[in-house]
Image: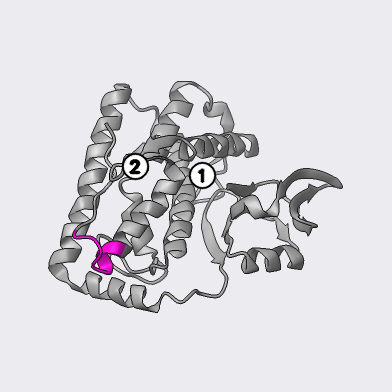
Amino acid sequence: MAVLYLVEQGATLRKQGERLVVEGEGEILASVPAVKVEQVVVFGSVQLTTPAMVHLLRSGVDVAFLSVDGRYYGRLVSAESQFGELRLRHLRLVEDGERALELARAMVRAKLHNCRTLLQRAQRERPPPDPVNVLLSFGYTLLAQAIQAAVQTVGLDPYVGFLHVPAYSRPSLVLDLMEEFRPVVVDSVVLRLVNARILTRADFVEQPEVAERPVALTDEARRRFIAAFEERVQTRVTEPREGRQVTVRRLFELQARQVAAVALGQRERYEPWLIR
């Protein structure tokens, strides 16, 4: 299964037969089997035809809409499945202060452990902060979309978390589950791209007229970052509970299923993923 990133401005996503086709300026930019697409991430001014949207909705494919520079706008989701009991148990778990605190502590412990391990591996000084913060922000946005898709697949409420308190439009559970993956997925990708000079200062443009985003990635640099991010989440790792080899992207869903199992009383506690 694949994630389809639509970054070419002015492009259109169509459904032709059994394939999803991306067209731009009169030519086909990409063509993939529709059944192999598990998520679509749309950046900026990209059009989706009605047949394409109907297919995505009927197939339960998550579609996230972002600005060109990665700010989250919203998502297209199909009709909810029958997850009533799970969501009720989820809310009860959040309201159980002792158990919710235990789960939140596990997530924070994993984040600190994984950050420390990553920094020990790198043993290098970080480059100047502004461009790096742009990369980190963009990477965390991509990570959030991937984890929210996993949370919704499992049937949990993405807006009810344990570590991050609920707030208007804040996907608190998504932010919770991101904690153990931020250093492992995003930070590691940023370090590799910068240290290997795959991305340099020449890949950033200054836009002082945009107060909230004075530095931005070029379109080509954004494509390179997405490619590196996808390479990372498709890396196979050992799933700690059963020792299976799974992709990091698959691990997002397995961790979300752990939360569901704790909520339903099928597991005693949540076990975060710790790197070595």
Q: Quadrant of the C terminus?
A: top left
Q: Earlier in the sequence, mark 2 or mark 1?
A: 1
Give the class, few, some or many, for how many residues have Cα within 10 Å of label 2's Cα (few <14, many ≥20).
some
Q: Amino acid at mark 2?
A: Glu
Residue drawn at x 48%, y 52% as measured from the top left: 146
Q: Amino acid at mark 1?
A: Pro
Whether the magenta-drawn stretch holds residue 265 is answered as yes
Q: Position of residue 12 (x, y in %)?
A: 76, 55
Q: Is residue 274 left or right of residue 43?
A: left
Dominant SS in magenta: loop
Give the class, few, some or many, for how many residues have Cα within 10 Å of label 1's Cα (few <14, many ≥20).
some
Residue drawn at x 36%, y 51% as measured from the top left: 178
Q: Position of residue 148 (x, y in %)?
A: 45, 59
Camera-side residue of 70 and 150: 150
Residue on which disc 2 sits? 239
Q: Assign a secondary structure to mark 1.
A: loop
Camera-side residue of 252 and 183: 252
Res 205 seen here: no
Residue drawn at x 30%, y 46% as measured from the top left: 180
Whether the magenta-drawn stretch holds residue 200 is answered as no
Residues shaded magenta: 261-268
Q: Looking at the picture, does residue 79 appear above or below residue 182?
A: below
Res. 214 mark: 1
Q: Looking at the picture, does residue 30 appear above or below residue 123?
A: below
Locate residue 151: give its quadrant: bottom left
User: Which residue is situated farthest in the right direction here?
Assistant: 26
